[in-house]
Amino acid sequence: QPNCALKEHSMSNIASVKSPYEAENSGEELDQRYSKAKPMCNTCGKVFSEASSLRRHMRIHKGVKPYVCHLCGKAFTQCNQLKTHVRTHTGEKPYKCELCDKGFAQKCQLVFHSRMHHGEEKPYKCDVCNLQFATSSNLKIHARKHSGEKPYVCDRCGQRFAQASTLTYHVRRHTGEKPYVCDTCGKAFAVSSSLITHSRKHTGEKPYICGICGKSFISSGELNKHFRSHTVVWSMN
């Protein structure tokens, strides 16, 4: 596992820090730090079980990214994010599906895979529309469709998003960053899913199959487009 070291802090700088609050917080977001109430983020209203979790969370809003990949220079707000990212360089996938032996870089990816592809339960249910989800994080994201909450804000143009990942992809439109590169032809992409779809052009893999005619496709978008051709035929008949 990679060592999560701060990029710009020397040992003398670290030694001079008097308290965690002085190191990372101005004090405003920690109004409740001396009270018995659970600490809450004043920016987005999220509640945490302990102050240290709130301090880590505040890095998202402040743009603080102290954990830096020594291979590509990409920075992250949390140590575990860096560890997961390094696996994109090493190819390490320590979490294996017992049913199909497919490997994953993150445990949550394995849980999601098992529930989606092997018929396991979807225990997280939306109170508003009763839609069910394989993970609690997917339910939280879905709930924002009902509430209209968009806690992630682009500091360049002010556009707001419901998901942190959507904000990340949006920011790359401003920066032009394309970190996902095809090993076969060198073409680069801003989004990992675009690289996965592109790679199938080289491998010939077509995992999305039409249940009506059996034709297969490299992406769900192509399958949906194809499916509409069946809908047109039905409407004509």
Image: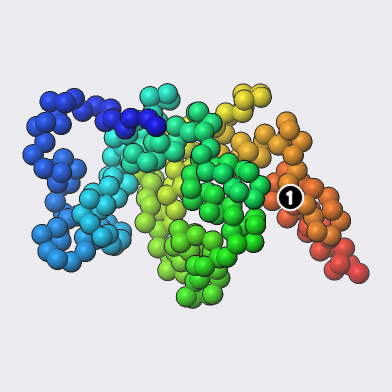
* Crowd tier of the residue under label 1, counting other residues whose Cα lies within 10 Å: few below 14, some 14–19, many 20 or above: some
On the picture, is 157 further left or further right than 109? left
Q: How is the image coloured?
A: rainbow
Q: Residue at x 49, y 51 (%)?
A: 108
Q: Residue pushed farthest front?
A: 98
Which residue appears at 31% of the width and 32% of the height?
4
Question: For the C terminus, which image quadrant?
Answer: bottom right
Q: Is residue 202 above or below residue 127?
A: above
Amino acid under label 1?
Tyr
Residue at x 73%, y 33% (from the top left corner)? 203
Q: List x then y, in percent, for residue 171.
A: 44, 41
Q: In the rendered view, does 185 fall on the left or right side of 111? A: right
Whether residue 58 is visible here, answered yes or no, is no
User: Observer-nearest residue: 106 or 63?
Assistant: 106
113, above or below 196, in the image: below
Label 1: which secondary element: strand
User: Residue 147, position in %: x, y?
Assistant: 42, 68
Residue toward you, 100 or 108 = 100
Residue 17 in the image: state x and y as whole percent.
11, 36
Q: Residue under circle 1? A: 208
x, y percent for residue 36: 14, 66
Considering the image in quadrants, where does the N terminus appear?
top left
Question: Residue placed farthest to the right in the image?
Answer: 237
Hey, which quadrant is residue 69 in on the image? top left
Relative horizontal placement of residue 128, taking residue 225 as reference (left or right): left
Determine the residue positioned at 81% across, 63% down: 231
- Front in this rendered view, residue 191 or 95: 95
